[in-house]
Amino acid sequence: MHTLYTIGTWRVALQSYLDQLASLKVSRLIDVRGNPRAGRQEELKRSFAFERALAGVGVSYEYWGRRLGEDAMEANTAHMALSQLSALAARETICLLGHLHEPSGC
C-alpha cells in the first residue's frame, strides 16, 4: 500500500522539502498549483533547477495544475485526473504540491 501526501509552499526552504520527500519515500511530486511559477519562494517555482533538485533525491516531477488544480475542481472537470491519481497512488508514494500551507485548505 502506498500513500498520498500533500505539501504547500509556505516559508520552507527547498532543502527542507527535499529532506521531507526523501524521508517519506515519495517517488513522484505532482504540482497542482494553478500557476506553478507564482509565489514568493523563487526556489519552489517550477523550473529546471527545481526538477533537477527533486530528481537528486529520487523524486520525479509532473505538472497537473490544469487537470487537477483549483480551476478544474471548481469546474467539476477533474474526474478523469482523480481516477488517474488513484491508480498512480496504488502503485507508488505520491505527494501533491499546492500553494496552501495548511492541509485543511487543500
Image (tube, rainbow, N blue to C red):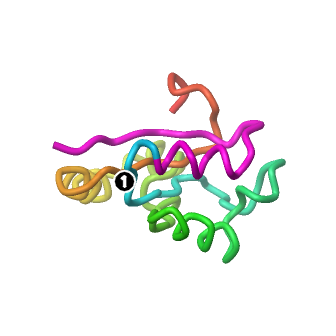
Image: magenta residue range: 1-22
Q: Residue at x 68, y 51 (%)?
A: 15
Residue 86 location (% of width, % of height): 23, 50
Above-or-below relation of 27 to 40: below
Give the residue type that dot 1 points to: Thr
Residue visible at 51% across and 22% down in the picture: 104
Query: 12 or 81: nearer the eye?
Result: 12
Q: Position of residue 16 (x, y in %)?
A: 65, 44
Residue appearing at x 31%, y 50% in the figure: 93
Residue 89 as seen in the image, left or right of residue 24: left
What residue sits right under mark 1 in the picture? Answer: 77
Neighbour tally class for label 1: few under 14, some 14-19, many 20 plus, Cα within 10 Å: some
**For residue 104, side relative to residue 38 (left or right):** left
Nearer-the-camera pick, 68 or 31: 31
Compare residues 18 and 92 and report the one nearer the observer. 18
Q: Is residue 5 magenta?
A: yes
- Whether residue 41 is in magenta: the answer is no
